[in-house]
Amino acid sequence: MDSFGTRLHRAITERGPLCVGIDPHPGLLARWGLTDDVQGLERFSRTVVEALGDRVAVVKPQSAFFERFGSRGVAVLESTIRQLRDAGSLVLLDVKRGDIGSTVSAYASAYLDPSSPLYVDAVTASPYLGVGSLAPMFELAAEHGGGVFVLALTSNPEGAAVQRARTADGRTVAQTVIDEISQLNRGATPLGSFGLVVGATIGETGHDLSGVGGPLLAPGLGAQGAGAADLRTVFGSSLASVLPSYSREVLSAGPDVAALRAAADRVLVDCRAVLPAR
Ligand SMILES: O=c1ccn([C@@H]2O[C@H](COP(=O)(O)O)[C@@H](O)[C@H]2O)c(=O)[nH]1
């Protein structure tokens, strides 16, 4: 199989630079006229797959909203992942895993081994037990054409206190994460398989993203207050690597399939106005 970076580059070229999240918040289920239970979860997810699975480059189910229904919610997540793959979108599971290396191995098997029921194209991971502890994920991803998006500068205001703290060598914690992921992507073309999560809400921070060589997932657009124009401020000369991510902004247009498609088209137009052509 081609590497995740190659597959993502192709998907963006064919479908445009957009990631849409499946975040079935209780409030959204109610707004869609659905019950806050497994049936509502299943209906919500199927509708998003029907609306966007064949047109958006990446779909990002948020694991938490499935896990809250226990094993039956996870079963819905498994079938949603299968349906998305069948529809042709890449699946990025937002699950933000991180642990000591031996446990990360098990997480890697859960999400990045093709024989797993929860197998996806890429996952989000937390580097706060050390980027090196994520090595089993990087290795399995490389073996099977998968990707890993590591949290660097998150979109929430609380993240800055940890992520922008200075290390002994004067770099911020986030910059050390950025630099380690850049190393992993060295020499990869057209795009590395190891990405970073950098929120669209964070403004100009002075971090150097120019050598990352992999995708920069940008959540925080729409419901969290950032707009496409903010991507210029946050990413500067690295705009060409940005994968904008919207959840509630698009999902709140549902449950009508045509309205969901129109909302995704609208945010894609906004992003294309800012991002370089790919
Ligand atoms: O820094 C981060 C990392 C992840 N997220 C996730 O993205 C979506 C955002 O949803 P919206 O409805 O578009 O606000 C959600 O799943 C978060 O857990 C993030 O927001 N920021």
Image: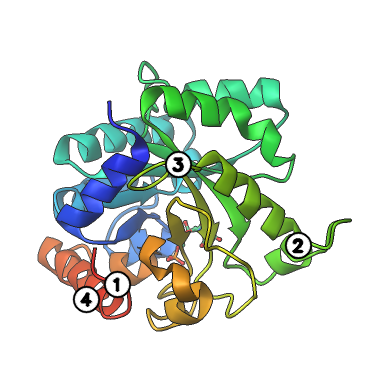
Structural crowding at the residue carrying mark 4, measured as other residues with C-alpha within 10 Å and reported as few (<14), some (14–19) or many (≥20): some
Q: Is residue 233 above or below residue 109?
A: below
**Which SS class for mark 4?**
helix
- Asked whether the residues under the numbered discs 3 and 1 touch, taking CB atoms below 8 Å apart as contact, a structural biologist would say no
For marks 2 and 4 on the same chain, the one whose residue lies earlier in the sequence: 2
Q: Which residue is mark 3?
A: 187
Q: Is residue 163 left or right of residue 180?
A: right
Q: Is residue 111 left or right of residue 31?
A: right
Nearer to the camera, 270 or 191: 191
Report how far apart the C-alphas of labels 2 and 3 lie in the structure: 25 Å
For marks 2 and 3 on the same chain, the one whose residue lies earlier in the sequence: 2
- Residue 172 bears which disc, if any? 2
Residue at horizontal 57 percent and vertical 80 percent from the top? 203
**Colour mapping used in the image:** rainbow
How far across and how far down the image is residue 109, in percent? 50, 21
Residue 227 visible in the displayed image = yes
For marks 1 and 2 on the same chain, the one whose residue lies earlier in the sequence: 2
Q: Which residue is mark 4?
A: 269
Report how far apart the C-alphas of labels 2 and 4 lie in the structure: 34 Å
How far across and how far down the image is residue 201, in percent? 54, 75
- Residue 276 bears which disc, if any? 1
Image quarter where the N terminus lies is top left
Q: Is mark 2 within 8 Å of ligand 1?
A: no
